[in-house]
Image (cartoon, rainbow, N blue to C red):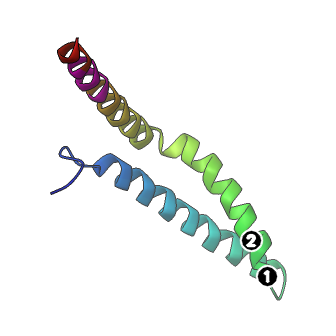
Amino acid sequence: MSNYPEGVKEFWVYTGLRALLFLGSFALVLAVWLLVADTAELFFVAIIALVLSGIGSYFLLSAPRQAFARRVEQRAESAKLRFEERKARED
């Protein structure tokens, strides 16, 4: 039985899209780097791709991020209500 009865779909969707955006950015930066130079420094390619995917995710993934934030907020409110109910029963 899962600890998350309502699922964590929003988390996986957002995380998957972030990973795909990073991999796409990495491939793009690597391709451009190899077109300009004969060899590529993978460390710097990864750093540039990380920055580009971070900027891109801010603009491109706002809807999945907001859906994830709403789910987290709902779960926090639900936990708060359960805590308040237990506290009221103890009193």
The magenta segment is 79-86
- Which amino acid is tagged 2? Val
Rendered position, 81 above or below 30? above
Q: Main secondary structure of the magenta part?
A: helix
* Location of residue 17 (image quadrant): bottom left
Q: Residue 45 — which label?
A: 2
Residue 17 or 84: which is nearer the viewer?
Answer: 84
What residue does disc 1 label? Answer: 40
Task: Please say if 56 is above or below 83.
Answer: below
Question: Which quadrant would the N terminus be assigned to in this image?
Answer: bottom left
- Residue nearer the viewer, 60 or 42: 42
Q: Secondary structure at mark 1?
A: loop
Image coordinates of residue 37 in percent, x first then y, are: 84, 82
The reply to whether discs 2 and 1 touch (Cβ–Cβ < 8 Å) is yes
Q: Is residue 84 left or right of residue 73?
A: left
**Residue 2 falls in which quadrant of the image?**
bottom left
Task: Work out whether mark 2 precedes mark 1 in sequence or the reverse, and give the earlier one.
Answer: 1
